[in-house]
């Protein structure tokens, strides 16, 4: 994950100066735990200079008998993109990669001294490229002011995150990634963040209203405020269960569960963080690789891509349906399968089946995951961290939805759409993740050639299995619901 927005951005924008660029922050599923440079600070006090104005979006809960009912929902910008300043004035607490020691000599003092500022409707649209559209949200890769990428969380329409409990349920969303080139990632995923954003822990008085509390299975060190203190030295990471629903550009896509051995948002240090740069990737508390289902990687090269020759044409919008199947078909049963289907042009399309020798099926199960790890010669950290049973327990506890668009300085998104690891032979099973050759995957290239790229997320629904997509759609291939 790249460094974050300089905290002066909002101040410069609000008071007439040019905003600084804000690289996207989400680590790739295989960014391998590298310790990254410090970016924008997450403040713990609630600012009062700009009134926060969350963009609203569509959310519906569905049942088989009653259909779908609208619920209040909005999105809030992640705290790392926001201006943070001294709580009594306008001086930045963090500028150009450096903490101001007069406010932040240590984490506790910093949290008590600095305020995290709001973003108004104009700021969301013009500064960050986050815009309400019919039934959802469009997120632009770049804005004219220099912002790059963004991440938001779904709220309950008030000042808390919407907490989803999806075991024995399904989740669906319409996506449009037609403008996302190799190296970009429109990512929508669940993480086990606190529903209040950690408000009330330590000196955190800002909470979910200001986008605090982020964690994921990569245990990122660039989360600046953890448990109410500033992570002034970047020594700590924030770990939690992660369920990647949709990571995609127009060339490749994957969905991936990442179980952990801890619950909730966990502030890690040392070996627990699983830092790849220290050779400790598989010694940490979370499964950083996850068990990914990428149709291209599993041998179905004609399943997803840009054009009518593919089963799924990424130049057109599609509905992405993810079903969390339990052993006994009840909410109390163990999670045993994560099943994917799509709806496009009135057709229900089952996910591709693996053609990799020794790996069978077209859904994520523990057997699929272990067979895949063996075939690709990867460590089976998924089972070591408890597999789908543990993932189901996190779904029971509840998870928060993140929506994002980003590029990737660490691996250039090759883990999603190209050969990865890049120095491995492409003849080795599992190395080819997509058809991109990697030559145009770098952030430098994308920021000069893909300024107009955007992703659209619309019609978010959740509910009973089989209830969130059109029952009358024609089915292509045999699927179970």
Image (cartoon, rainbow, N blue to C red):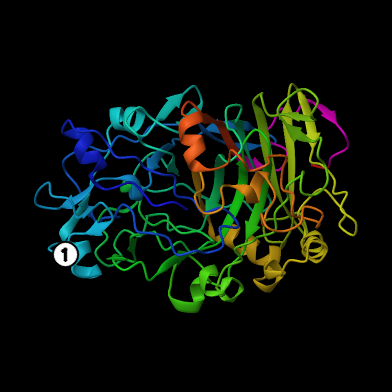
Identify the residue at image location x=68%, y=66%. Answer: 382
> How many dots with numbers?
1
Q: Residue at x 59, y 33 (%)?
A: 181
Write the start and end of the magenta stretch as one range. 462-479
Mark 1 element type: loop
Q: Is residue 95 left or right of residue 420?
A: left
Q: Main secondary structure of the magenta part?
A: loop
| Direction from residue 103 to residue 227 in the image, left or right | right
Horizontal relation, residue 193 to residue 474: left or right: left
Measured from the top left, where is residue 123 in percent x and y?
A: 29, 32
Residue beneath the point at 83% across and 46% down? 299
Report the quarter where the C terminus lies: top right
Q: Which residue occupies the foreground of this view, 42 or 74?
A: 42
In the rendered image, residue 239, in percent from the top left (x then y), is placed at 48, 65
Give the camera-side residue of 34 and 383: 34
Observer able to see residue 151: yes
Within 10 Å of disc 1 (Cα), the crowding (few <14, some 14-19, many 20+) is few
The vertical placement of 244 against 15, above or below, is below
Q: Is residue 450 magenta?
A: no
Against 219, residue 252 (above or below) is above
Q: Is residue 49 above or below residue 475?
A: below
Q: Is residue 60 above or below residue 307?
A: below
x and y percentages locating residue 140 in the rendered image:
45, 31
Q: Is residue 471 magenta?
A: yes
Locate residue 86, reporting x and y percent: 14, 53
Residue that carries the numbered disc 1 in the rendered image: 101
Examine the image and state in which quarter residue 334 appears.
Answer: bottom right
């Amino acid at each position: 994950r790249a460094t974050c927005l300089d905290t002066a951005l909002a101040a410069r924008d609000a008071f007439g100066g040019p905003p600084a660029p804000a690289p996207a922050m989400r680590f790739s599923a295989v960014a391998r735990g590298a310790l990254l440079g410090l970016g924008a600070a997450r403040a713990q006090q609630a600012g009062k200079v700009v009134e926060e104005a969350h963009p609203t979006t569509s959310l519906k809960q569905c049942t088989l008998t009653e259909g779908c009912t609208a619920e209040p929902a909005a999105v809030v910008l992640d705290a790392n993109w926001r201006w943070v300043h001294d709580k009594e004035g306008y001086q930045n607490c963090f500028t150009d990669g450096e903490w101001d020691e007069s406010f932040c000599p240590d984490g506790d003092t910093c949290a008590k001294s600095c305020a995290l500022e709001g973003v108004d409707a104009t700021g969301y649209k013009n500064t960050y490229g986050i815009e309400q559209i019919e039934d959802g949200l469009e997120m632009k890769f770049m804005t004219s002011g220099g912002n790059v990428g963004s991440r938001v969380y779904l709220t309950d329409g008030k000042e808390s995150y919407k907490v989803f409990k999806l075991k024995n349920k399904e989740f669906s969303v319409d996506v449009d990634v037609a403008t996302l080139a190799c190296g970009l990632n429109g990512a929508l995923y669940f993480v086990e963040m606190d529903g209040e954003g950690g408000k009330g822990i330590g000196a955190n008085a800002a909470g979910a209203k200001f986008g605090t509390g982020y964690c994921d299975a990569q245990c990122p060190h660039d989360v600046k405020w953890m448990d109410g203190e500033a992570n002034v030295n970047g020594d700590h990471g924030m770990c939690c269960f992660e369920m990647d629903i949709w990571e995609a550009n127009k060339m490749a896509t994957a969905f991936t569960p990442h179980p952990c051995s801890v619950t909730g948002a966990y502030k890690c240090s040392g070996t627990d963080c699983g830092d790849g740069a220290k050779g400790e990737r598989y010694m940490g508390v979370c499964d950083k690789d996850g068990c990914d289902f990428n149709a291209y990687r599993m041998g179905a090269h004609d399943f997803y891509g840009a054009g009518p020759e593919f089963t799924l044409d990424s130049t057109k919008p599609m509905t992405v349906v993810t079903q969390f199947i339990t052993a006994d078909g009840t909410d109390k049963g163990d999670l045993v399968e994560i099943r994917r289907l799509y709806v496009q042009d009135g057709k229900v399309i089952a996910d591709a089946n693996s053609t990799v020798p020794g790996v069978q099926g077209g859904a994520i199960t523990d057997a699929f995951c272990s067979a895949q790890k063996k075939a690709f010669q990867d460590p089976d950290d998924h089972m070591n961290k408890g597999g789908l049973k543990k993932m189901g327990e996190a779904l029971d506890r509840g998870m928060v939805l993140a929506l994002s668009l980003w590029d990737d300085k660490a691996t250039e998104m090759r883990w999603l759409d190209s050969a990865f690891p890049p120095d491995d032979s492409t003849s080795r099973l599992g190395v080819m993740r997509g058809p991109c050759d990697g030559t145009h995957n770098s952030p430098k290239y994308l920021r000069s050639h893909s300024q107009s790229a955007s992703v659209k997320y619309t019609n978010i629904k959740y509910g009973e299995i089989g209830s969130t997509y059109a029952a009358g759609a024609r089915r292509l291939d045999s699927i179970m619901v």
